[in-house]
Amino acid sequence: MSLDSEALLDLSLSRGTLHRNGNGRREGDPIAKALADASTRVVDIADGRVLTCRVDGRLRLVHRAPRFDDGGESGLYLGHDDDGTNYVAIVHEGPESASGPDRGWRSLREAGADLDDTDSGVLTTAVALANWHARHRFCPRCGGPTVVEEGGWVRRCTADGSQHYPRTDAAIIVAVVDDDERILLARGPHWPEGRLSVLAGFVEAGESLEAAVHREVMEEVGLSVIDLVYKGNQPWPFPASLMVGYTAHATGTEVTLDPAEIVEAHWFTRGELSFAARSGEVGIPPRVSIARQLIEHWHGGPIEAASDSRPTVEATR
């Protein structure tokens, strides 16, 4: 594997600038302390969506001041910015109505690429923590109920006292190219017709990132690859992944699909993909994803895609 001077530097969900204040989280109740400060900014999150608005054409999160009914297990301490302002997320069962033509509830997939660095970090962290809490209300060791500690960054089992922390599942994602500089794009069995992306898969137990690239490409499309180049990484909390991006060179072009993972795969030249994406024949990943960044890096610039105006497809890459 080699490192590339042309790394992906504008990964939307890796731009967060919040200080997570790990040491401070262990001192008392960080949520109560933050909510007692009128300058704290609160973000409401419901079903993975947050209220957003447009200010001077720029998409922003709608922050509010703390309220008397905030806190409890629905509160998540996210950290503080360079000015010392604390950020807290409050998790709700369902979104309330949004008033105003420029206001609306948006998911991280929909909003992440358009937010500034602070708001991107706030939303990414809030979604990641909310997803973890929703799936870890009981102890994986004994099945006992767990309670929230350290501002939402720990769950402690009330039966055996064990502590549990938010998990992150490493996954590789790789743009495979051939001798003619064509890129290989593929579709999983649960994706809609025409929706294509680069190859990806989870890192297995005891496996290095590079070994996962070789294995996943061979398993999914039957190709051997060389010249792996690390391009960057970003969190992908759907529900808890860290996507580690690579490019790789295929030693051949004849694909053999694993139908359980891939139902179609095609090689594209830059011109072919540009036309197919613009016409809507092919849908490519949203701009917020590292998959889109890998594709556009290969392409040499942004791709105009009809799929950008369609509702976001909930997929893993």
Image (cartoon, rainbow, N blue to C red):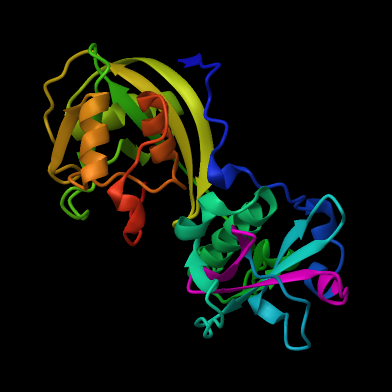
Q: Residue at x 73, y 75 (%)?
A: 64
Q: In the image, which residues are magenta?
A: 33-60
Location of residue 30 with respect to 288 vertically, above or below: below
- Depth order, front residue of 222/313: 313
Q: Residue at x 55, y 71 (%)?
A: 102
Toward the front, the furthest residue is: 56
Location of residue 234 with respect to 161 vertically, above or below: above
**Is residue 260 on the magenta stretch?**
no
Q: Position of residue 36 (x, y in %)?
A: 87, 77
**Corner quadrant of residue 124:** bottom right
**Corner quadrant of residue 216:** top left
Location of residue 230 with respect to 47 vertically, above or below: above
**Is residue 54 on the magenta stretch?**
yes
Q: Residue at x 44, y 19 (%)?
A: 229
Q: Residue at x 47, y 35 (%)?
A: 244
Q: Position of residue 292 (x, y in %)?
A: 39, 39
Location of residue 142 with respect to 59 vertically, above or below: below
Q: Position of residue 91 (x, y in %)?
A: 60, 76
Q: Position of residue 81 (x, y in %)?
A: 80, 53
Asked whether residue 153 appears in the rendered view, the answer is yes
